[in-house]
Image (tube, grey):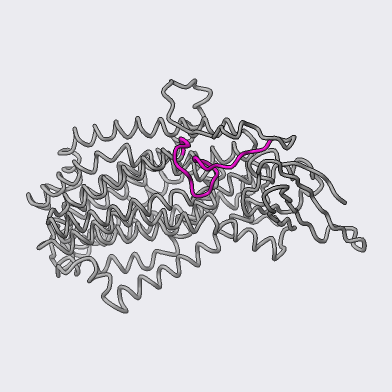
């Protein structure tokens, strides 16, 4: 049986579902965008006469001018279908992994350069307090990526291309406005904010390093937020390659400047701040250029080299000289047009506030710790900075699978294909647990099998003593972390932002309660106040992740939820 159909949007699965409705029970797997001009397509169904059921299904897209691409459809549980799901996930996750890891690698490189050139722990302590404040400030606005991705992906998957472009432009506008406001706030209230972070306790020299680092890095706030929004838009178009290419270039710039300014110029945290700020502005300008259609993209979905879309009658939906352009809007949008982004962003923002308060609170409490074996507050902050950067790097590695699931789940649900969303969710969770175990083993070898991690970051004895128990916590927590981030991506793809905000509030409250309980038990056992505070902070962070994982799991398996993970075909 041959059923003719045409490509109506950017991706073929919409046409398949619309014109071959009897195949709704089959899982549709798309390897890559195939919509091109003058395409001729046909659905060839091979029917099993004996069983009177579809035993084999394939889709063959034959291009009149530009070759062909074969995409397989298979019923749930088929080996070929599982392979297709895995390939779809990893085609997004692998580039996302590299690009997500590059961002913390910038700070990790700064930490390593400063730690290796410093004569004591004050430089790292000051940089650590300021970096924790900046992490809190920047990631409060990660909704610019988290909320934008599913909104763009679902609109694009449902055929509302214009709606996807509008959301993208709104996100870019919001990022620049919020980034400029954040810069002003950090500069105006730097003294008060650093005081909260405990720089007054770590000493005058560490406080001076913190002020210098914060002043320079705050100038990058508009760039950082624009990068987040741009990445969200590109992920919505299932493009994780373009951010990777641009971030690699930015990281090379950052590394080169670290060598010149920190190693060569002896500028310490100030030089590291200049290097990272410069790299982030280069990255932001390049991403905005791609979205505006001025620079080429790596995937060809957006940018100056983007593919020409076709309409349902197989003709071009626009002049081939025209390109899709996503730029910040200078006009004030109506509430109806901006309402979805604002509602989603508000929920993610509240969730981020709770999370970042917990992480920044951990840094502030570290500054008030007397330290392991009396190593002192400065060594405690330095150890916390190193452990936290390793934790963040591993989290970003785990978040690569979450980035893929976020885009693919939103794409599937936007196209009214819940079976695919469920298949993607199960696969991502399985691979995330394997990744978490692999990270634990790698970190354990670097910590206990060799002294690589210790030697790489610091030679200060007090800092090394304070760092060892923290690395133990980091090693053991990786499988849990990996599951938490995978579950986050799945729920974000399903636009469960309000639930995640409530769950984070509950988890954060439980973590604070756990920390207070640990401190109380320590004092009750005669341990001097502040001795084990740093370790208790990290135990509380693990408890936070445990609560996040539990609440996310309950939502994902909920029979009334959008995923219904345990539902069988």
Q: Position of residue 121 (x, y in %)?
A: 13, 60
Q: Which residues are magenta?
A: 291-311
Report the side of 102 relative to 198 (left or right): right
Is 540 or 399 nearer to us in this picture?
A: 399
Q: Would you identify the image quadrant in which residue 520 lies?
A: bottom left
Is 170 included in the stretch rendered in magenta? no
Is residue 504 visible in the rendered image? The answer is yes
Q: Position of residue 233 (x, y in %)?
A: 49, 40
Considering every residue shown, the one lying at the far front of the view is 65
Report the side of 434 relative to 29 (left or right): left
**Residue at 27 percent of width and 70 percent of height:** 453
Q: Position of residue 500 (x, y in %)?
A: 48, 44
Q: Number of numbered discs present?
A: 0
Q: Would you identify the image quadrant in which residue 429 lies?
A: bottom right
Report the side of 165 relative to 200 (left or right): right
Considering every residue shown, the one lying at the far left of the view is 204
Q: Main secondary structure of the magenta part?
A: loop
**Residue at 27 percent of width and 68 percent of height:** 469
Is 306 included in the stretch rendered in magenta? yes
Report the side of 505 relative to 259 (left or right): right
Q: Against 393, is 373 above or below?
A: below
Is residue 368 visible in the rendered image? The answer is no
Is 23 or 545 nearer to us in this picture?
A: 23
Q: Quadrant of the C terminus?
A: bottom right
Is 152 or 523 nearer to us in this picture?
A: 152
**Residue at 76 percent of width and 48 percent of height:** 24
Q: Position of residue 340 (x, y in %)?
A: 52, 31
């Amino acid at each position: 049986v041959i059923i003719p159909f045409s490509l109506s949007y950017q991706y073929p699965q919409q046409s398949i579902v619309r014109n071959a409705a009897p195949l709704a029970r089959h899982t549709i797997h798309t390897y890559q965008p195939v919509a091109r001009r003058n395409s001729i397509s046909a659905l060839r169904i091979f029917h099993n006469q004996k069983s009177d059921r579809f035993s084999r299904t394939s889709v063959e897209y034959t291009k009149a001018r530009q070759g062909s691409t074969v995409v397989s459809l298979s019923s749930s549980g088929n080996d070929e279908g599982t392979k297709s799901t895995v390939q779809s996930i990893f085609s997004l996750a692998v580039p996302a992994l590299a690009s997500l890891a590059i961002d913390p690698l910038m700070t990790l490189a700064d930490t390593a350069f400063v730690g290796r050139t410093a004569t004591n722990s004050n430089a790292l302590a000051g940089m650590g307090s300021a970096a924790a404040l900046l992490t809190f400030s920047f990631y409060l606005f990660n909704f610019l990526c988290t909320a934008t991705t599913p909104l763009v992906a679902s609109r694009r998957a449902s055929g509302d291309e214009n709606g996807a472009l509008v959301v993208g432009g709104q996100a870019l506008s919001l990022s620049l406005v919020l980034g400029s406001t954040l810069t002003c706030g950090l500069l105006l209230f730097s003294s008060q904010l650093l005081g909260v972070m405990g720089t007054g306790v770590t000493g005058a020299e560490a406080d001076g390093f913190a002020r210098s680092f914060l002043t320079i890095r705050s100038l990058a706030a508009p760039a950082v937020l624009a990068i987040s929004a741009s990445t969200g838009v590109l992920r919505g178009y299932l493009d994780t390659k373009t951010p990777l290419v641009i971030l690699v270039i930015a990281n090379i710039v950052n590394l080169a400047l670290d060598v010149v300014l920190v190693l060569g110029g002896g500028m310490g945290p100030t030089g590291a701040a200049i290097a990272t700020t410069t790299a982030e502005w280069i990255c932001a300008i390049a991403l905005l250029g791609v979205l505006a259609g001025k620079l080429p993209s790596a995937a060809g979905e957006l940018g100056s080299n983007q593919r020409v879309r076709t309409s349902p009658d197989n003709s071009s939906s626009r002049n081939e000289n025209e390109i899709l352009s996503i730029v910040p809007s200078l006009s004030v949008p109506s509430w109806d047009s901006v309402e979805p982004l604002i509602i989603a962003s508000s929920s993610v923002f509240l969730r981020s506030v709770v999370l970042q308060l917990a992480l920044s609170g951990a840094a502030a409490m570290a500054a008030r710790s007397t330290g392991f074996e009396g190593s002192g507050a400065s060594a405690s902050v330095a150890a916390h900075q190193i452990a936290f950067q390793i934790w963040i790097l591993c989290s970003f590695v785990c978040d690569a699978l979450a980035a893929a699931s976020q885009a693919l789940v939103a794409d599937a649900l936007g196209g009214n294909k819940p079976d695919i969303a469920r298949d993607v969710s199960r696969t991502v969770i399985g691979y995330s647990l394997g990744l978490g175990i692999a990270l634990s083993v790698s970190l354990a070898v670097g910590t206990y099998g060799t002294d690589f991690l210790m030697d790489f970051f610091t030679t200060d004895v007090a800092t090394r003593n304070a760092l060892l128990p923290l690395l133990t916590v980091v090693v053991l927590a990786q499988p849990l972390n990996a599951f938490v981030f995978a579950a986050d991506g799945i729920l974000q793809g399903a636009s469960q932002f309000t639930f995640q905000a409530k769950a984070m509030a509950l988890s954060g409250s439980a973590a604070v309660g756990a920390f207070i309980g640990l401190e109380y038990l320590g004092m009750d056992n005669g341990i001097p106040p502040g001795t084990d505070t740093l370790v208790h902070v990290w135990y509380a962070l693990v408890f936070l992740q445990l609560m996040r994982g539990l609440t996310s799991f309950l939502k994902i398996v909920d029979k009334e939820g959008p995923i219904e993970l345990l539902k069988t075909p």
